Image: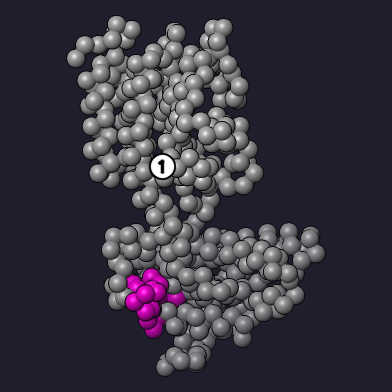
Amino acid sequence: MTKPLEDPGLDLEFIDVVADWLMDEALADTAMTDLVKGCCQRLHAAGVPLLRALVSYRTLHPLFGAMWLTWHRENGMGTYEMPHGQLGAQTFRKSPFFHMLNTGVPFLRRKLEGADALLDFPVLPDLVQQGATDYLAGNVPFGGGSTMEASEDGIFVSWATDRPGGFTETDIRSIRRIQKRLAVACKVRIKTEIAHNIVTAYLGPDPGQRVLEGKIRRGDGESIHAVIWYSDLRNSTRLGENLSPDDYLGALNSYFECTAGAVLDHGGQVLLLIGDAVLAIFPTIEGGDKAAAEKALAAARESGIRMAAVNEERRGNGESRLACGLALHVGTLTYGNIGVPQRLQFTVVGPAANEVSRIETLTKTLDRPVLASAAFARLVDEPWEDLGSHVLKGIPNPIEVFAPPERVA
């Protein structure tokens, strides 16, 4: 195949190779960063003089609404998670992509040097500082429509070069051809990524991954040994009656950040948020029971510190204090799907799960914020206070409980 005279360095046969590679990757489980990186490197090797490229797409995630992946010839790959809310919206509104979305323009070009230079978006002067001479942006919707909603479900792509004179027409034709195939490969991966985000947010990382791997039928599960955490907000009924719905939800979320947040930060798995209760586990597969118990106790200590900070802030705002009871236990559990065939939960069940919830009820009776079973207390070398054996509802044998030292409680 004859190379155009205007592009002595562009190999159109290799552009075909890039296109074929993207179609192969659409069928593979390639990470988005590797997909973008591989495409840019191959385009550059084919003779398209890329300095920087960016791929942006919307996602479903509780912490951020979109991902921006950048490739730079010298600096490699970078990622930016655009947060929900005003900050993310402001960033997007200043971009060429927002202009394209509002005007329905699928393709945009800005010369960055010479008399034709037009630097009408904040990103463009930054690119000039990096030596860029030309900028292209494209919008490839997944839905095939032209409405704003359809266009948002797709990818935005931008390309910049530092070659004097900018991109040639053959460069541009090659880029526009490749970005459609890049969009196909990205679509497959984005849908998988969104599915993973959703099951992680609602089920947790480990249960979510198991569900995605096919553990979807009622009864799918296994026997595990784990440290068990169960905490419950005190006086939640009174809070619900005295607070507005928004204030009550705010109080609940503060409580969950103190408890479930501490569990996650110390390596535990939050399985259920049951109204105002938290059921979590620290599996004992790696490091044994002692390591899992130490993580759980560290999470309990962190939870108390967070709760104290929240209450100090609430006191300053004239709001009522939050408190909770927490029980720590260890035992064998059934870990898997329960429910009806059409509506399942991936959680833990078994005698140990019943026992930890009953131990938590003793935190009110004994007026102790944290209690541990004897099985848990034996695992951690602390000056535990023996509070004796207690008969608990639905539990056949009395359970001996201990209170941790004051620095933990």
Where is the N terminus found, in terms of image quarters? top left
Magenta segment: 329-352
| Numbered disc 1: secondary structure | loop
Quick one: which residue is furthest to the front in this view? 146
- Is 47 situated above or below 250? above
Q: Is residue 251 visible?
A: no
Residue 250 part of the magenta-drawn span: no
What residue is pinned by disc 1? 144
**Circle 1: residue type:** Gly
- Is 225 situated above or below 182? below
Q: Residue at x 29, y 25 (%)?
A: 42
> Which of these two is toward me, 391 or 263?
263
Q: Position of residue 184 (x, y in %)?
A: 33, 39
Label 1 crowding class (10 Å Cα cut-off): few <14, some 14-19, many 20+? few
Q: Residue at x 52, y 54 (%)?
A: 62
Q: Position of residue 201 (x, y in %)?
A: 46, 59
Q: Quadrant of residue 240?
A: bottom right
Q: Main secondary structure of the magenta part?
A: strand
- Is 374 situated above or below 113? below
Q: Residue at x 76, y 66 (%)?
A: 319
